[in-house]
Image: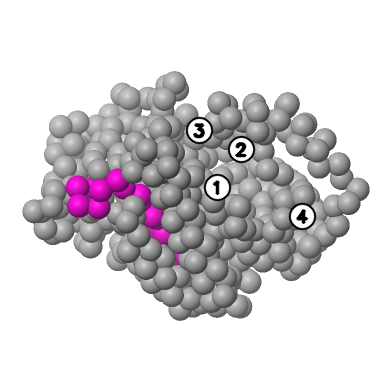
Amino acid sequence: MSDNKNIDMKQVWQQDKDHYIHPWTDFSTFKETGSMVLADSDNVHVQDGEGRKYLDGIGGLWCVNIGYAREEMAQAIADQVRKIPYYSCFGHHTTVPAAQLAAKLAELAPGNLNHVFYGCGGSVANDTAVRIIHFYFNQLGKKTKKKIISRIDGYHGSTYMAMSITGVKFDHIGFDIDEQLVHHISCPNPYRRPEEQSLEDFCNEKVQELEDKILELGPDNVAAFFAEPIMGAGGVIVPPEGYHKKTLDVCRKYGVLYVSDEVVTAFGRLGHMFASEDEFGIVPDIITCAKGLTSGYLPLGATILSDDIYEVISKPQADGAIFTHGFTYSGHPVSCAAGVTNIEIMERENICGLVKDLGAYFEEQVKTLIDLPIVGDVRGRKYMMCIENVANKETKELIDPDAKVGNRIAEHCQARGLIVRPLAHMNVLSPPLTLSKENIDFLVATLRESIEATMEDLKRDGFL
């Protein structure tokens, strides 16, 4: 790790507290406590401004797939800056890495998803998908097909449209969303199904709900269904087997486009470059991705379209008409160079293969926490896991929200050198994909100690 001796960390902390508006900030505490300053990193560890080292159990935010501070990435980024740091890709200009990365993504994506539109992240990738979908149906003369269906507890981003598609109700408090354009169906969470209901019946019920919603809104009015293969920020929800195939069949039946939001699941987190086909057996019409695309080294997102969609949207509307969608930083050459190098590293080091091996061990070890009295469910796959904490394992009753159990566990973990993500009564794990077996053992043992310490706190404070 590098030397930060010449930086006044107390001044940085104050500057941050006084001027930086953080995403997802709890202002009830931030104005007093400020933020932990992260100053350095190496592989699976980060270091704060005081020199304390932490195993990063969340990969920053579902990112850093290849690990922190890779010299090869730094060199590729620096080399591209020296060649051409920026050029607009509007109209008939491109750069070498933008073209190379698009070709690579087309090679890796399933089916005939061969056409790539770039943005700066996952939210923009999903906004782009909506705008292109609407344009697509306009081109086909189906101008009423505008409505979007997504799921409660699905997360698709924080721009206006992406947050409207997002179904995490907590994220909507105090903000506006488009409730005319976007409609939500139930979360396919097997843990919360009725006790007497089989997984198959639960799956069929949720699939039927999608079909019923399409019929309620009118097939001529519904444009697309957005679905994460595994729902991330909504609690790492793995739908029952067959769910994605059956919902895709429903979409095909009514001419509704299927958008697979792989912002989290792509680029190795589940052991595949893309999870839609390799993990869940579907080829969607559109895949959106970001995060692991550059392992978070630089901002980049992509909306990957099928040949069928591209053939329609690439036909001129009229003489002189152009495709008027895009951003200043679409196809940014330095970000694309980072994407190309990131994928090269993943392929050369067989990171997907490592995830299938050690990721299976990680999943198995995290699931051993189910024996703890407040752990009601441990779910997920490979390096995408969630621990759901409850007051009663039999009834699945939640602990009083005032207890902030997820935060308590995260604080105990941090004190022991581990960062995990609190989500209300849950804790989420999405570490770099370069963990060693020793890292995994430390992570799980520390999490166990932290949950046990939290249980003592909850008993002391009258919550258990």
The mark closer to the camera, 4 or 2, is 4
Is residue 436 among what the camera can see? yes
Which quadrant would the C terminus be assigned to in this image? top left
Residue 457 shown left or right of residue 253 in the figure: right
Span highlighted in magenta in the image? 379-396
> Residue flagged by tag 2: what amino acid is it?
Phe
**Toward which corner of the image does residue 234 lie, by quadrant?**
top left
> CA–CA distance between discs 4 and 1?
18 Å
Q: Which residue is mark 2?
A: 327
Name the N-terminal-most of marks 4 and 2. Answer: 4
- Secondary structure state at the residue bearing disc 1: helix
Considering only order in the chain, which callout, 3 or 4, is on the residue closer to the N terminus?
Answer: 4
Which mark, by number, is residue 411?
Answer: 1
Residue on which the image places disc 3: 159
Instruction: Judge whether residue 383 is colored magenta.
Output: yes
Q: Disc 4 or disc 3, which is closer to the eye?
A: 4
Q: CA distance from mark 1 to mark 3?
A: 29 Å
Residue at image position (73%, 33%) is 16
Provide residue 457's location: percent of width, then percent of height. 45, 45
